[in-house]
Image: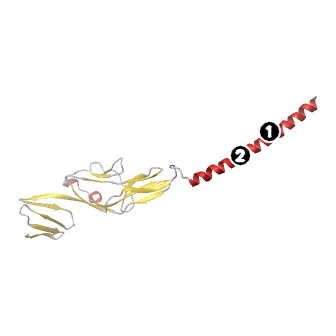
């Protein structure tokens, strides 16, 4: 009786081993077919590098009394992270009251007084960078310049440090300036 139980156990073991091999074979074929179909019809979950939805312009000039917001947004899968960098590649950090990166990836320069002007913040070159696991995308260089409104009797001038500008007063007299001084020209 002992021999017949051992023989039955061996037969049962062989049957189970054969079934497991067959099941493994079916699973392998199923995975192969599913993989082939997935390659034929890529899902929306496929990894995709970042592309700009809203790339910032390359030149921004704004008045200190108004401030400005420079938009930058990107799409991709997974969703890209948007950061800003300076011309030398340093990650932009928030400067309270002068510059901060918003939740939507935009770079915000709030209004500020002339005394709070900082050349490294308000006359600088920035770049928006979007990145995810599929890649990194950098925007064109964004040149930022902050200007000031100065009042001289009836003359209103937009002053941008070391940059030529054009404007007019209440009588529509055209003037322009550069680093060497103001020149006035009648219209």
Q: Quick check: 138 left or right of 119?
A: right
Q: What element carries label 1?
A: helix
Q: Quick check: 34 left or right of 130?
A: right
Q: Is residue 5 or residue 80 the one in the foreground?
A: 5
User: Looking at the rendering, in which quadrant would you find the C terminus?
Assistant: bottom left
| Residue 5 percent location from the top left of the image | 89, 31
Q: Residues within 10 Å of mark 1 (few under 14, many from 20)?
A: few
Closer to the N terminus: mark 2 or mark 1?
1
| Residue 60 percent location from the top left of the image | 27, 60
| Residues at discs 2 and 1 in contact (Cβ within 8 Å) | no
| Residue 42 percent location from the top left of the image | 54, 52
Q: Is residue 51 or residue 173 the one in the foreground?
A: 51
User: Looking at the rendering, in which quadrant would you find the N terminus?
Assistant: top right
138 relative to 11, above or below: below
Q: Quadrant of residue 137?
A: bottom left
Q: Residues within 10 Å of mark 2 (few under 14, many from 20)?
A: few
159 relative to 3, above or below: below
Q: Quick check: 74 left or right of 163?
A: right
120 relative to 27, above or below: below
Q: Residue at x 14, y 64 (%)?
A: 167
Q: In which quarter of the image is residue 58?
A: bottom left
* Residue 61: image tag: none
| Residue 117 percent location from the top left of the image | 23, 56
Q: Which residue is drawn at 49% across and 55% down?
A: 48
Q: Residue at x 45, y 50 (%)?
A: 79
In 3D space, how far apart are the residues under numbered discs 2 and 1 (Cα atoms)? 15 Å
Q: Name the residue under label 2.
A: 26
Q: How did the renderer colour the structure?
A: secondary structure
* Residue 16: image tag: 1
């Amino acid at each position: 009786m002992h021999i017949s139980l051992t023989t039955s156990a061996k037969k049962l073991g062989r049957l189970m081993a054969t079934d497991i091999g067959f099941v493994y074979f079916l699973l392998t074929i199923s995975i192969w077919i599913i993989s082939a179909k997935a390659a034929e019809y890529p899902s929306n979950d496929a990894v995709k590098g970042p592309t700009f939805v809203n790339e910032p312009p390359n030149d921004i000039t704004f008045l200190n009394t108004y401030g400005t917001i420079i938009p930058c947004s990107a799409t991709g899968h997974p969703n890209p992270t948007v950061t800003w960098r300076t011309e030398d590649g340093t990650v932009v950090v928030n400067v309270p009251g002068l510059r901060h990166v918003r939740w939507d990836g935009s770079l915000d320069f709030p209004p500020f007084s002339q005394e709070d002007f900082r050349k490294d913040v308000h006359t600088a070159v920035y770049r928006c960078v979007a990145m995810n696991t599929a890649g990194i995308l950098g925007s064109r260089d964004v040149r930022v310049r902050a200007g000031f409104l100065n009042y001289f009797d009836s003359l209103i001038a937009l002053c941008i440090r070391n940059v030529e500008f054009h404007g007019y007063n209440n009588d529509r007299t055209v003037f322009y300036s550069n680093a060497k001084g103001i020149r006035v020209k009648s219209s």
